[in-house]
Image (tube, rainbow, N blue to C red):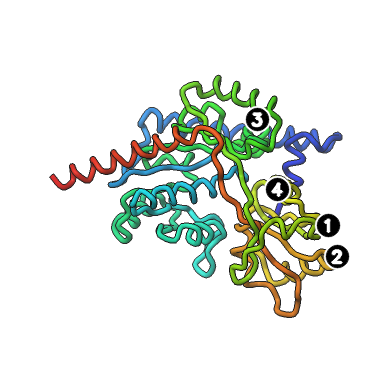
């Protein structure tokens, strides 16, 4: 199996790589994307025309997804949503397909979700309908959160929340593998709410143009704006490291996420001195050798600490050898809404009210 470096791939499809070879590769990728795009369009037509049936769960379903591959802030939104549902005294469960999960070791996202949402059950099943039935029967879930569910139309949902990364909202404007789009931009109309993440990382002129595009592509869909706030770092033993104590600290940064550039920029904005970095493919499965190699690179750069994302931390914290004094920590991050939070909360509350109505109906 050929493993493609995702950063190199992004450079290619974004047009940053020039020359005859790069142009030829882009043309080839566009040709390959045609049958995939046709299949996606055909599937959507079948679901929209009800020739393929969406199956309803016994309890309400809220989907959080995206229209592109890579990191759009979907996981932090799922965590925020579950905590909001918990605050409303609802017993909820997250349905996730568990990308790169095996029985011996769960993948990063289910482990992160389980840790961040202590009162929420996490059900890993590639069959979302079966996962919904399990969440209802085994965990008594009153509401389901469908993680990465925008394209998974077999399970009917009552609220479709779509995340768009403001730094790369439309995946370079092309369908996979010529771009990062999972489906055509016309699919934006299926969303009930669009959450624009990393809104503070682009110029105001760019965000204004993006909002104009969204008004044309999905005129009836409300837009909520959010930013990623890194509040502190966390080391082994859940030791909290305030950001002001890390200012000017020499850090070697590593990650295996969908949007590594955004993470590196956040570290830089936090005031740390990035003396080196290593980027792995999204959902990279770390080994003991990876960590040893990272420590050697960090020491060679004169770094005082190794810093990663929380998503990477759940796969690396136990791999650090006892023979090194190198500090290993992750940068804690929360989603902060800067505009439109009331719209999102109102849409969620409507679903909760519908759930109450269903329960009353079931009792009668």
| Residue 275 occupies quadrant | bottom right
Distance Cα–Cα, label 1 vs label 3: 34 Å
Would you say 226 lies left or right of 178 here? left
Q: Identify the residue position indicated by label 3 in the image.
A: 173
Specify whether residue 182 is in view: no
Whether residue 174 is situated above or below residue 62 in the rendered picture: above
Distance Cα–Cα, label 1 vs label 2: 7 Å
Nearest to viewer (mark 2 / mark 3):
2
Nearest to viewer (mark 1 / mark 3):
1
For image coordinates 57% across by 59% down, the residue present is 108
Numbered disc 4: secondary structure: helix
Numbered disc 1: secondary structure: strand
Q: Identify the residue position indicated by label 4 in the image.
A: 266
**Where in the figure is residue 203, as x and y percent of width and height?**
71, 30
Distance Cα–Cα, label 4 vs label 2: 21 Å
Which sits earlier in the primary sequence, circle 1 or circle 4? 4
Q: Closer to the camera, 284 or 72?
A: 72
In the picture as drawn, the residue positioned furthest to the left comes out as: 364
Q: Dot 1, crowdedness within 10 Å: few (<14), some or many (≥20)?
A: some
Which sits earlier in the primary sequence, circle 4 or circle 2? 4
Q: Closer to the camera, 52 or 218?
A: 218
Q: Identify the residue position indicated by label 2 in the image.
A: 302
The disc label shown at residue 275, or none: 1
Numbered disc 3: secondary structure: helix
For image coordinates 36% across by 32% down, the residue present is 51
For image coordinates 49% across by 67% down, the residue present is 103
In which quadrant will I find the N terminus? bottom right
**Where in the figure is residue 287, as x and y percent of width and height?**
67, 69
Distance Cα–Cα, label 3 vs label 4: 25 Å
Nearest to viewer (mark 3 / mark 4):
4
Distance Cα–Cα, label 2 vs label 3: 41 Å
């Amino acid at each position: 199996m050929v493993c493609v470096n995702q950063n190199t791939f992004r450079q290619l499809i974004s047009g940053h790589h020039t020359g005859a070879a790069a142009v030829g590769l882009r043309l080839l990728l566009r040709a390959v994307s045609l049958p995939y795009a046709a299949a996606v369009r055909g599937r959507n037509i079948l679901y929209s025309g009800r020739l393929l049936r969406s199956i309803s769960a016994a309890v309400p379903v809220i989907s959080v997804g995206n229209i592109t591959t890579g990191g759009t802030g979907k996981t932090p939104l799922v965590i925020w949503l579950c905590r909001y549902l918990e605050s409303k005294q609802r017993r909820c469960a997250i349905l996730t397909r568990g990308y790169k999960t095996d029985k011996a070791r769960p993948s990063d996202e289910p482990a992160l979700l389980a840790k961040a949402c202590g009162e929420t059950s996490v059900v890993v099943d590639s069959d979302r309908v079966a996962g919904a039935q399990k969440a209802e029967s085994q965990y008594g879930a009153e509401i389901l959160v469908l993680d990465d569910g925008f394209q998974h139309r077999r399970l009917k949902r009552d609220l479709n929340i779509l995340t768009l990364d403001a730094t790369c909202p439309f995946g370079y404007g092309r369908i996979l593998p010529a771009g990062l789009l999972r489906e055509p931009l016309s699919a934006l109309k299926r969303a009930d709410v669009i959450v624009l993440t990393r809104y503070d990382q682009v110029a105001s002129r760019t965000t204004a143009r993006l909002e104009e595009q969204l008004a044309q592509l999905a005129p009836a869909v409300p837009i909520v704006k959010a930013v990623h706030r890194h509040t502190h770092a966390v080391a082994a033993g859940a030791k909290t490291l305030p950001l002001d104590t890390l200012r000017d600290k020499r850090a070697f940064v590593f990650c295996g996420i969908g949007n590594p550039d955004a993470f590196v920029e956040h570290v830089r904005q936090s005031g740390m001195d990035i003396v080196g970095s290593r980027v792995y493919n999204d959902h990279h499965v770390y080994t003991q050798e990876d960590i040893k190699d990272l420590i050697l690179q960090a020491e060679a750069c004169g770094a005082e600490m190794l810093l990663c994302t929380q998503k990477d931390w759940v796969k690396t914290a136990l791999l650090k050898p006892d023979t090194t004094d190198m500090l290993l920590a992750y940068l804690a991050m929360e989603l902060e809404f800067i505009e439109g939070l009331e719209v999102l909360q109102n849409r969620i509350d409507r679903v909760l009210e519908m759930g109450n109505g269903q329960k009353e109906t079931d009792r009668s």
